[in-house]
C-alpha cells in the first residue's frame, strides 16, 4: 500500500461496507436458516447471491485496470485478486465447508446477522475468533520453529 | 393449450426450486458486488470478510500470523462496522425490529470454530473466494468455492438426516 492515503479512504471503506452489509441482509444470507435451506436443496435462490455478486465484481475487475490507471484514494494500481494454489486451499476449504454446513453462517454474513439484531450469532462469532486464533497460534509457532531449525543448520 | 400446460409446468418447477422467488437473492447479490466495487474503484483493494478475524486478533496478540495484518487492521474494522450498520439499516427499513435465529447455539459455536480455522487456512471465504475470487476468474478461488460448497452441502444434509433441527 502506498504511503499517501486520502482522508476519504476510511469513509469510502465504510460506505462500501454499508452497501455490502445491506446487500447481505437483503439477500437473507444473514439468516442461517436460509443458508441451511439452500444447502439442503429446499431453496436454490442463494446461488443468485454469489452469481450476482461475482457478476458485478467480474465487470469491475475486468474494466478498472483497462480504463483507469491508479486508484484515486491510495495511488495503488488495480490488480486482480489472485491467490496461490496449494493443498491448504483444499484442506481449509473442506474445514470451512464443515463449519458452514453445520452452522449456516460464514464470516461476512455473521457480521450482517449481528446487524439485523441476531444476538445468537455472537456464538458463531466467538467460534470464528477462537478458530482463527487456534490456527494462527499453531501456524505462527510452526513457522517460528522452522526458522529456528533452519538457523541452527 | 399445450403451450399453456408447458408454461404451467415450467412455472411450477421454478416455484419448487425457488419458493421465495429470486429477486431478493439477485438484488442482494448485486449490492454485495457493488459494495466490493465501491471499495475497489476507490482504493484498489478487493475486500474479503474473513481476514478481519485475524487482523483484529493482531490488536491483542503478537503472533506472526496476525501481525502480518497490522497495516490493514484499521480499515478492516471499519469495513466490518459498515457491514453491521448496513444490515442494521436493512432491519430498520424492512424488518421493523430485531430478528433472532432458531439454529441451536452449539451448532453456531462449533460451526463457527470450523469456519474460523477453515477460512484462514483455505485463504478465503464466501466473499473473498466466492465474490472477489470468482469475479477475478481465479482458478484457486474456483477450486476453493467448489470445495467448501460440496462439503457444506454434505454436512448440512448429514446433520439434517440424523435429525438435528434447527
Image (tube, rainbow, N blue to C red):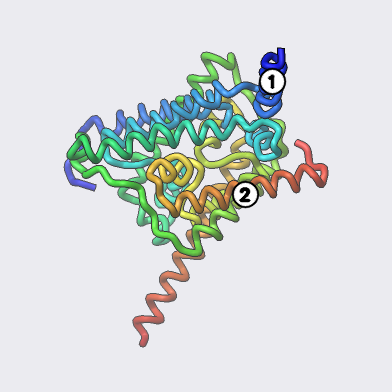
Please state if B13 lies on the left or on the right of B30 as rendered: right
The image shows residue B164 at horizontal and vertical percentages of 79, 42
Kindly give the residue lying farthest to the bottom in the view shown: A153
Please state if B145 lies on the left or on the right of B109 as rendered: left
User: Vertical placement of A82 versus A103: above or below?
Assistant: below
Q: What is the count of numbered marks? A: 2
What SS does tag 2 mark? Answer: helix
- Report if residue A48 is visible in the image: yes
Query: Which of the two residues, B93 or A148, is positioned nearer the viewer here?
Result: B93
Which residue is rendered at x = 54% and y = 59% of the image?
A90
The image shows residue B5 at horizontal and vertical percentages of 72, 17
Please state if B89 lies on the left or on the right of B5 as rendered: left
Which residue is rendered at x = 35% and y = 34% of the image?
A59
Query: Which of the two residues, B146 or A153, is positioned nearer the viewer here?
Result: B146
The image shows residue A101 at horizontal and vertical percentages of 65, 45
Query: Which of the two residues, B121 or B23, is positioned nearer the viewer here?
Result: B23
Which residue is rendered at x = 52% and y = 59% of the image?
A135
State if disc 1 and disc 2 touch (CB < 8 Å). no
What SS does tag 1 mark? Answer: helix
> Is circle 2 on the same chain as circle 1?
yes
> Which numbered disc covers residue B6?
1
Q: Nearer the viewer, mark 2 or mark 1?
A: 1
> Which numbered disc covers residue B117?
none
Q: Quadrant of residue A12?
A: top left
User: Vertical placement of A146 versus A40: above or below?
Assistant: below
Kindly give the residue lying farthest to the top in the view shown: B1
> Which numbered disc covers residue B150?
2
- Quadrant in which the C terminus of chain B is drawn: top right
- Quadrant in which the N terminus of chain B is drawn: top right
User: Vertical placement of A42 versus B8: above or below?
Assistant: below
Name the chain letter of the residue that bears numbered label 2: B
User: Vertical placement of B61 versus A54: above or below?
Assistant: below
Amino acid at each position: 500500500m502506498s504511503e499517501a492515503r486520502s482522508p476519504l479512504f476510511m469513509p469510502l471503506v465504510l460506505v462500501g461496507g454499508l452497501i455490502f452489509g445491506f446487500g447481505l441482509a437483503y439477500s437473507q444470507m444473514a439468516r442461517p436458516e436460509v443458508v441451511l435451506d439452500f444447502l439442503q436443496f429446499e431453496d436454490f435462490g442463494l446461488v443468485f447471491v454469489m452469481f450476482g455478486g461475482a457478476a458485478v465484481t467480474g465487470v469491475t475487475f475486468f474494466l478498472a485496470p483497462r480504463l483507469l490507471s491508479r486508484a484515486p484514494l491510495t495511488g495503488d494500481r488495480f490488480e486482480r485478486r489472485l491467490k496461490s494454489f496449494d493443498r491448504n486451499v483444499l484442506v481449509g476449504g473442506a474445514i470451512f465447508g464443515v463449519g458452514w454446513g453445520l452452522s449456516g453462517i460464514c464470516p461476512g454474513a455473521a457480521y450482517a446477522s449481528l446487524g439485523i439484531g441476531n444476538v445468537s450469532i455472537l456464538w458463531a462469532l466467538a467460534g470464528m475468533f477462537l478458530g482463527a486464533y487456534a490456527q494462527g497460534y499453531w501456524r505462527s509457532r510452526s513457522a517460528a520453529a522452522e526458522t529456528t531449525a533452519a538457523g541452527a543448520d | 393449450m399445450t403451450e399453456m400446460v408447458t408454461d404451467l409446468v415450467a412455472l411450477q418447477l421454478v416455484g419448487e426450486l425457488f419458493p421465495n422467488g429470486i429477486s431478493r437473492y439477485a438484488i442482494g447479490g448485486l449490492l454485495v458486488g457493488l459494495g466490493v466495487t465501491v471499495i475497489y474503484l476507490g482504493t484498489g483493494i478487493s475486500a474479503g470478510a474473513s481476514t478481519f478475524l485475524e487482523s483484529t486478533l493482531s490488536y491483542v496478540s503478537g503472533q506472526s500470523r496476525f501481525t502480518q495484518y497490522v497495516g490493514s487492521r484499521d480499515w478492516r474494522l471499519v469495513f466490518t462496522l459498515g457491514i453491521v450498520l448496513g444490515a442494521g439499516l436493512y432491519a430498520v427499513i424492512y424488518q421493523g425490529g430485531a430478528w433472532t435465529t432458531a439454529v441451536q447455539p452449539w451448532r453456531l459455536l462449533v460451526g463457527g470454530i470450523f469456519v474460523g480455522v477453515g477460512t484462514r487456512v483455505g485463504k478465503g471465504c464466501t466473499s473473498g473466494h466466492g465474490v472477489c475470487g470468482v469475479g477475478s476468474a481465479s482458478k484457486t478461488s474456483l477450486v476453493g468455492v467448489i470445495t467448501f460448497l460440496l462439503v457444506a452441502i454434505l454436512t448440512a444434509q448429514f446433520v439434517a438426516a440424523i435429525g438435528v433441527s434447527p
